[in-house]
Amino acid sequence: LAGSERLDRSGVASDSRRLKETLAINKSLSCLGDVFTSLANGSKHIPFRNSKLTYLLQDCLSGDGKALMFVNLSPTVESSNESLCSLRFAQRVNQVELGKATKHVQYTKGGGSRR
């Protein structure tokens, strides 16, 4: 997932396939932001099922895993709004404490372990 797309700057309005993909990326990132907000607030319900992305990340964000997010910023003035939006998103993510990561090992009858 590369990041949010501004429809006016991306030039995808004329390509319906790329427009659909751009809208899906933006929806997934919005849902991910909702999950991080719920986790940071200690909500009882975390909306993991609101998108495929958050559903797939549920195990990583449920307390037994760790997550790392990289934020790429553009140094151009034209991209300052997107950079600010990315920094705000990163700030929301930084508010979340998932707890200590744990390692789960299942032992099989053959004596080996499987992770």
Image (cartoon, rainbow, N blue to C red):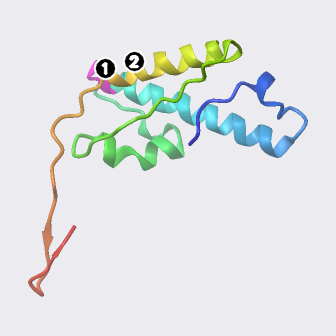
Amino acid type, residue under disc 2 in the picture: Gln
Q: Position of residue 40 (x, y in %)?
A: 30, 22
Tell me: residue 36, above or below residue 82.
below
Q: Image quadrant of residue 8?
A: top right
- Relative to 76, 88 lies left or right: left
Cβ–Cβ under 8 Å for marks 1 and 2: yes
* Residue occupied by mark 2: 91
The quadrant in which the C terminus is found is bottom left
Amino acid type, residue under disc 1 in the picture: Gln
- Numbered range of the magenta stretch: 39-43
Q: Position of residue 30 (x, y in %)?
A: 54, 28
Q: Residue at x 61, y 32 (%)?
A: 27
Furthest-front residue in view?
Answer: 75
Does the magenta segment cover residue 72? no
Q: Nearer the viewer, residue 28 or 85?
A: 85
- Relative to 1, 103 lies left or right: left
Number of other residues with Cα within 10 Å of mark 2, as a class: few under 14, some 14 to 19, many 20 or more: few
Which label was assigned to residue 95? 1
- Relative to 8, 69 lies left or right: left
Which label was assigned to residue 3? none
For the stretch drawn in magenta, the main secondary structure is: helix
The quadrant in which the N terminus is found is top right
- Relative to 12, 95 lies left or right: left
Q: CA distance from mark 1 to mark 2?
A: 7 Å
Q: Position of residue 73 (x, y in %)?
A: 55, 24
How many numbered marks does the figure carry? Answer: 2
